[in-house]
Structure formats: structure tokens, C-alpha cells
Image: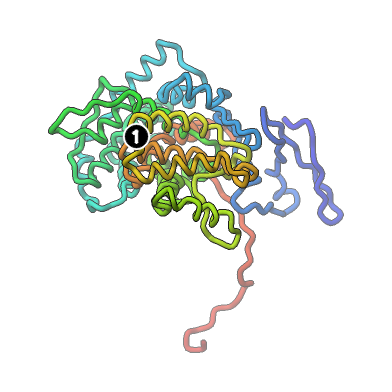
Amino acid sequence: MADKTAKLRIDEQEYELPILSPTHGPEVLDIRKLYGQADVFTYDPGFTSTASCDSTITYIDGDKGELWYRGYPIEQLAAKSNYLEVCFLLLYGELPTAEQMTDFQNRITRHTMVHEQMHNFFRGFRRDAHPMATMVGVVGAMSAFYHDSTDISDPWQREVASIRLIAKLPTIAAMAYKYSIGQPFVYPQNELDYASNFLNMCFSVPAEKYNVDPALARAMDRIFTLHADHEQNASTSTVRLAGSSGANPFACIAAGIACLWGPAHGGANQACLEMLRQIGTVDRIPEYIARAKDKDDPFRLMGFGHRVYKNFDPRAKVMKESADEVLDLLGVADNPTLQVAKELERIALEDEYFVSKKLYPNVDFYSGIILEAMGFPTSMFTPIFALSRTVGWIAQWKEMIADPQNKIGRPRQLYVGSGKRDYIDLSAR
């Protein structure tokens, strides 16, 4: 219920717009009845000033550098929790009890295998297909393999689909990677935790034993946690828009993956690594720093600053700790790209130009460094982002399905095309 109203005057007519007050964040003008009352739309390209829904899942304050999952600061969750516990929190709204956590882990663990016929589906792709292209196709095809959990009107089927997606996305991402490099698929291992299982499926081979380093598994788990949800971003909005039509959950998540693939969204950490490789060696950093400061030079430093966080990215501090730990473990001496990254980070944190403009290293900068050090190719960065974000997409999708105000998405437009004109026969043109 709105406690306040705003007045809008159009010509001589005045309209009252309810003002909605959130738990946190700026107040919101309710314009749902404006078109019916005044026969006008609002114009907001990119919907950057428009709330498309109300939600209880994630809160961001870009000016303060805050990110909360269900009210819990991301720094606390990254330091004290783990990804599967965060998954439970996002899905159900509260942290689990010990009994609930054991049950949830068991359900996820026992759904990690994919239908054996899906192996044939993978082999229909070219070997050089990008892993994201493969994932979009395979996740979308899950509705053909798991059609017993596509009825969105059935709460239990929604629950089963949720568990299946969270459990199987690491398997599918690892299979996409293995397929792209010509190695055999590795089946999940129930005795391994979520992050260790993913690393094992990516890097082990049947010919020899592979032991997952706990420090790498912990860093991988943090990457998953820090990317689990991020409010109404482009891919999340895509999932909600697809879901508003009644599409099945597998189709909705495939739509989210397709949106995330865009270089302006999920490809940021890949772009960052490609920039570091473009710089090449530490001695060339001053040249690129000068180019970044030159307003007339199109070169931009990737991985610094953030569109939403105007002060600092709260995820970056946590990710920096993981990056330092991983680089100490694996070393940077033999990797010119990581040497460039470390020196560029040092300069950015000390240089007055970067400090004054708040161009701090962001989460994409550090996650790219970690994944590079682990041995992942840049083509796998976005698939890893996708499997991390799957739980956020599902939580947002489930919230939307259960919302009594839910209706099919239908953005309006400002039409600037031709006026009505009559058809002219071909012979007369």
C-alpha cells in the first residue's frame, strides 16, 4: 500500500501516482494505471529507471557497494558459508538447519548425472563449437529428457526441475569443456563436494588419478557464491520474461544462458583476460595505462570499475583474497598474463587517476585471473558464470511464478516509423 502520491500534470489534467516504499532503496512511482487513465506510456530504454517486479531475493546499493542475498551481506556469506548453503538460502529464503542442509546436499548430489542419451546430443555439435553454444542447446533440450518436471503449475515439478538444474549444470558445463578439447566425458563423483566435483569433471582423465586441491576447490566455490545472483540484470530479466509466457524452466534457463553469453554481460572476465594478453608483458603496462588515460584513444581497461557499483564492488575484495591464495599456490612466474595482472592491479590501487575515478579492480578482473591460473581457457569463463548464476535464475523464476501479480511481459514502444500509407502495385512503383 502506498503512503504517498506524486502528481503528474499533462496539459490541464492532473493525475495521482502512488509512491511505493521498498524495504531498502529508492521509492518507486507506480505507473501501472497511467496508460488507462491518461493514454500515455513512459519511455525508458534499457529499463534502467523502471522496476519490472518486486522481489525479496537480492538487494544492491551501488553507491554504498552493498550486495545482499536475502538480507545477508555477500562478504559474510563468502567468508563463512558455501555455495550449496547459499543455493538453499536463495531458493527458500532462510539459511538451512543442519538437517535441512544434509537433505539438500544429498538431493543435489544424487541428481548430478545427466541422461545417458544426452551424450549423443553433445556429439551432434562440431568439435570446435563454443562451450556456451553447446550449453544453450543442451540446457534447452533438458525439457525433452526430463519432461516429468516441466508443468509449471505443479509446485513439486517446479521443485524437481530446480534441483535438477542446479545439480546438472556443472556436469553439462564440464561435458561441454571436455567435448571442446576432445577428451572423454568424466562422470560426477558423489563423494566430492559441489566445487571439487566440477573441477574433477573438468580436469581429470581416465588414465590417471586426479586429486582436487582444497584451496582451488575453495576458490571455485567462492566464484560460484559471488556470482549466484545479482538482482534484475539482463539475463535474469530474460529468464523472467521467458517465464512470464509460461515457458518450461529448462527453456527459461537456456534463454538466460543465451543472454549471459553477450560480451556486455557475462563475457566481461573473458574480455579482461584478452586485454591482459594484448598487453603481453609487464614492461608494456605504462603504454596501455597512458592509452587508458587518453580520452581520444578508444582503448579501455577491462575489469576495472563497475556499471552498478559506483564506489567499490563488494565481491572484488573477497575475490582478491582467493586470487592471492591461488596465485601463491600455483605461481605466476611462468605465466606472463598473470604477471601483467598482478602489476596492473598494483598500479590501479595506487595511481591517483584510477583512485580518483574509482576504477578499482572488479570481480571480473579477479575471477578471470583465478580461472586462468587454474587452467581454464577463456571460452569456459562464461559457462562457469552460467552454472554459478543458475540458482539465482531459478530463485527469481520461482518467485515470479508464485507472484499473484505475474502477467506476461509486454514492454511498450515509442513508434517513430512511417505513418499509414497505401500499397502500390509492383508495376506502378
Residue placed under numbered mark 1 in the picture: 331
Amino acid identity at mark 1: Gly
Farthest residue toward the bottom?
A: 428
Q: Is residue 404 left or right of residue 199?
A: right
Q: Is residue 311 visible?
A: yes
Residue in the picture at 54% in, 79% down: 423
Give the x, y percent position of residue 261. Answer: 41, 48
Give the x, y percent position of residue 68. Answer: 56, 28
Farthest residue toward the front?
A: 283
Q: Is residue 73 left or right of residue 284?
A: right
Give the x, y percent position of residue 56. Answer: 58, 28
Q: Quarter holding the N terminus? A: top right
Residue in the picture at 40% in, 27% down: 159
Q: Nearer the viewer, residue 182 or 97?
A: 182
Give the x, y percent position of residue 302. Answer: 49, 49
Q: Nearer the viewer, residue 127 or 167?
A: 127
Q: Nearer the viewer, residue 158 or 43?
A: 43
Question: How dense is the environment of label 1, judged by Cα within 10 Å: few (below 14), some, or many (20 and up)?
Answer: some
> In which quadrant of the rendered view does residue 340 lie?
top left
Farthest residue toward the right?
A: 12
Q: Nearer the viewer, residue 18 or 394?
A: 394
Tag 1, which secondary structure? loop
Number of numbered tags placed on the structure image: 1
Q: Is residue 157 visible?
A: no
